Amino acid sequence: MAEENKETKIPQGQNGHRSAAIHQRMNQKTKWPEVVGLTVEEAERIIKEEKPGVQIQVIPLNTGCTQDYRPQRVRLHVDFSGKVYTPPIIG
């Protein structure tokens, strides 16, 4: 009887990165939807309380950014009033 070749597949995370899926499986928070609508200062405080050592990067509305993945970075996309408008995620 021939053995089947079974490949172990790691599910990909929300943004398509395997690292994000690994963080999720380890029960580490990777997304903060609860900070949408808050100021940069409020959002940064909450995120850093839950994930110390993370680097926060503020991205103003209509500003481009690189697509590289960094597990210690969280981007805060803010509108013209300085409030977070999309849920920040690791990367």
Image (cartoon, rainbow, N blue to C red):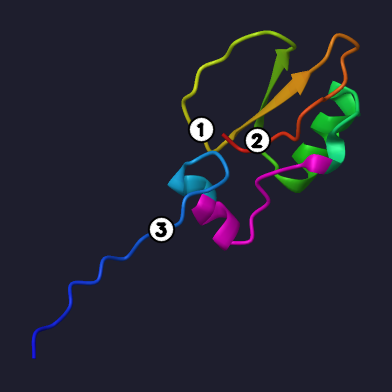
- Please name which of the two marks, 2 or 1, marks the residue nearer to the observer: 1
| Residue 2 drawn at (x, y percent) | 9, 84
Task: Tell me which residue sits at (76%, 29%) in the image.
Answer: 86
| Residue 47 drawn at (x, y percent) | 77, 39
Number of marks in the rendered image: 3
- Please name which of the two marks, 1 or 3, marks the residue nearer to the observer: 3
Residue picked out by circle 3 = 10
Upstream in sequence: badge 2 or badge 1: 2
| Residue 1 drawn at (x, y percent) | 8, 91
Task: Tell me which residue sits at (41%, 58%) in the image.
Answer: 10
Label 3 sits on a secondary structure element that is loop
Task: Tell me which residue sits at (44%, 48%) in the image.
Answer: 18
Q: What is the quadrant of residue 77 in the picture?
A: top right
Label 1 sits on a secondary structure element that is loop
Residue picked out by circle 2 = 54
Drawn side of residue 30 relative to residue 83, left or right: left
Task: Tell me which residue sits at (85%, 36%) in the image.
Answer: 35
Residue picked out by circle 1 = 70
Label 2 sits on a secondary structure element that is loop
Examine the structure image and report whether residue 31 is included in the region drawn in magenta.
yes
Upstream in sequence: badge 1 or badge 3: 3
10 Å crowding of disc 2: few (<14), some (14-19), many (20+): some
Magenta segment range?
Answer: 21-33
Q: Is residue 91 above or below residue 60?
A: below
Q: Is residue 4 above or below residue 33?
A: below
- Whether pointer 1 and pointer 3 mark residues with C-beta atoms closer than 8 Å, the reply is no
Q: CA distance from mark 3 to mark 2?
A: 24 Å
Q: What is the quadrant of residue 40 in the picture?
A: top right
Q: Is residue 1 above or below residue 38?
A: below
Three-letter code, disc 2? Val
Drawn side of residue 48 relative to residue 5, left or right: right
